[in-house]
Every structure is written in C-alpha cells, then in structure tokens.
Amino acid sequence: MSENMERYNFSKAELHCHLDGCFRTGTILELARNRGIKLPTYDEKEIQQYINVKKRCSLKECLSQFFNFLPTFAGDADAISRIAKEAVEDRAKDGVTYVELRYSPHILANCDVDPLLFAKERGRLRPKDVVEVINKAVRESGEKHQIKVRTILCTIAEYSHWGIETAHLCQEYANEGTVGFDIADIEGMEKNLKDNMEIFQFCKKNGIHTTVHAGEGGPAAEVQLAIEKLHSDRIGHGYRVLEDESIYEIAKTKGIHFEVCPISSFFTASVPEDWHKHPAKRFFHDGVNFGLNTDDPGVLQSTLMDEYDIATRYWGMTTKDLHTLNINAAKSCFLDGAEKYELVQNLEKEYQNFNFE
Ligand SMILES: [Zn+2]
C-alpha cells in the first residue's frame, strides 16, 4: 500500500468527476489502434503531451486536449463501456465508496446530435444509447468493485437544444442511476439565458437535482447566476465567488455545496499559483460546505488522494477535517431520502471508529 493510500485509508464520497475525462493512457492507445483512429503518436510517453495537462495553462487550453483523446471512444458503445468500467474501478482504488460520475451524452454520441464535436464520423449511437451503455457499465463495474455509482448528465450552455434533451434523459433514466443535471461553459449564457432558465425550471419541476460549472474561469457573477437564476443545488468549482463578498455571503447563507477540484483549478489557472492562497483554504476556515474532487483524473493524471495531500499540506487540514468534507459531500449528494441517509450514516459510523494514530 502506498504512503498516501495508508494515510487516507477511509471511505470517500466524490461528486465532481467527468467520466469523459477519466481514462488510462494505455486504453486510449489501444482503442485508437483498434478503431483506426489517428493519434499524433502511439508512444505511451510521447502521447502525454497531447492527452494530459502537465503545466499551468488556461481552462481553454486544458479543454483543447479533449479533442485529442475523445475521438478514440466517442461514438463507439464498446469503447465507452470500457472507459466507464475502468473509471469506476479506478475510483474504487482511490477508496471512493460513493461517486457521482458525470458526462455529456451528446459529446459521446454520433447520431441525432448536432454539432458532431468529437466522434470521428456519424453512426448509430444516439445520446439515449450512450446513457444506456454507461448505466449498464457502471452498474456492473460498481457491483464488482463495491462502489456505489450514480451519474449526472452534462450539457454545454451554448447548445441549449442539447440541454433540454439532456434534462429529458435525466427524467427518463431517473430510476436507473441518473441523479442529476449539470451545465458547463456558461460563459456565453446571456445569449440563451431564457432557454437555459426554462431547462432548469423543468429540472426543478421534475425533481432532477442540478449543479452548474461556475466561477471557475469566469467571474463571481456566474455563481450568482447559478444560485439566483438557475436555482442550482450545487456549484462546480466556484472559486471566483471570493471576488465578490456579497455573492459569497449569499452562497454561504444558502449552504450551497462547492465541488472543489484542487489540481484541476491549479492547471486551469482558475486560482492563484500559490497553494496557500487557494480559495478552498478560505472556504475551510469559513466553514463553507465543500468537498474535494478530481474533475478529470485521466487528463490530470491524478488521484483523489493527491487532492487530499494538497489540503493537508497547504491548508492545514487534518484527517478529521477530510472526514468532514466527505460528510459534506454525502449530505449534498444527489441521492434521495433513505439512500442519502444511509450513506451519511455509514460514513459517520466508520469515521467515529477511525484510528487516528
Ligand atoms: Zn468539471
């Protein structure tokens, strides 16, 4: 057992992890070879510069890597199933016992989707088929690796026609492990704010939980938009809320849960370079409701334990504090009633008996 594994050897709950950003490098190379997809190189070391992010850049630059690896599995049911199964297995290796994995059905589909962003060519895999493939894969892998997996369906604000379809898929598959709706890239939402507000109203009306990527690359106003106009249950990232104390106050008062992803925030330059000045340190000291997440562990080549290391090393968090963050995450997860209660209870029971030696 590695030193980190021993140190953070307790059950964890993770709420912000993109299935389409989880992969093993070897799998990407193998899928590319098998599917005849051209990559700049097939060397396991050299490919890293095309599919991983190893230096601090910008959110845009980080996302540009997705164009290099997503075509290796987008549009192919078997490839997507394999990526999903391995993602679950890898979360289990991190000691995660409850995870909400998110992905965009439209990004992974190659049929009934416009525009076709990542799949190599049009085929017969519809967004609905993607959801069914992933539900099956994560259910099987979850049972095998003893981890409870739920999914969140994502969309991109710019494509509001995807958004409403995604919300309908959340409703259709609510009994099969799909527990929430997420929207990314809300930068240009003013253009179609009305459409997006209607989507969130649909979610509210139909009991679909919501989270919004906000205040990451964009300003604090995004967090305000997410809370006050979209009535989001949680915020993905949200670091830049600290740029506006009044919005920060609103978030705190409402007890909004922030899905903090330390390593990702560093590489996308959404936070100061100095780890001691990371917004999560202030969240921690102010008793804000937040948890720690990996975001895109395949792209960032990171584990959840690497994230915990940052929290202990730079923000002065103890193992007990990390337990609190996991309880925060469990209490803010998208499970309903009895299932959520059981998750919180199980974690609390385990942490109470934890040997802090
Ligand atoms: Zn994210």
Image (cartoon, helix red, strand yellow):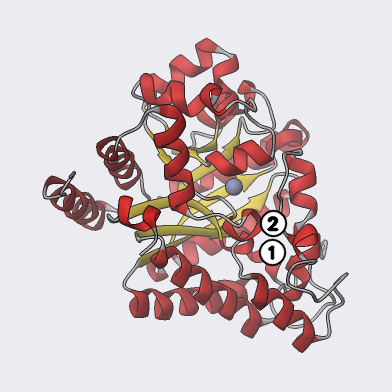
Q: Nearer the viewer, mark 1 or mark 2?
A: 1
Q: Is residue 218 left or right of residue 103?
A: right
Tell me the amino acid under the disc marked 1.
Answer: His
* Image quadrant occupied by the N terminus: bottom left
* Image quadrant occupied by the C terminus: top left
**Residue reaching furthest top?**
246
Please, is residue 141 above or below residue 336 in the view? below
- Residue sitting at x 70%, y 74%: 28
Please, is residue 120 above or below residue 310 in the view? below
Give the labeled residue for mark 2.
162
Badge 1 marks a residue whose secondary structure is helix
Q: Is residue 123 left or right of residue 174?
A: right
User: Is residue 50 or residue 169 the one in the foreground?
Assistant: 50
Give the labeled residue for mark 1.
106
Q: Position of residue 8 (x, y in %)?
A: 33, 51
- Residue sitting at x 53%, y 42%: 261
Tell me the amino acid under the disc marked 2.
Answer: Trp
Q: Is mark 2 within 8 Å of ligand 1?
A: no
Q: Is residue 268 left or right of residue 61?
A: left
Badge 2 marks a residue whose secondary structure is helix
Q: Position of residue 94 (x, y in %)?
A: 41, 60
Pointer 1 with pointer 2, Cβ within 8 A: yes
Separation of residues labelled 1 and 2 (CA atoms)? 7 Å
Q: Earlier in the sequence, mark 1 or mark 2?
A: 1
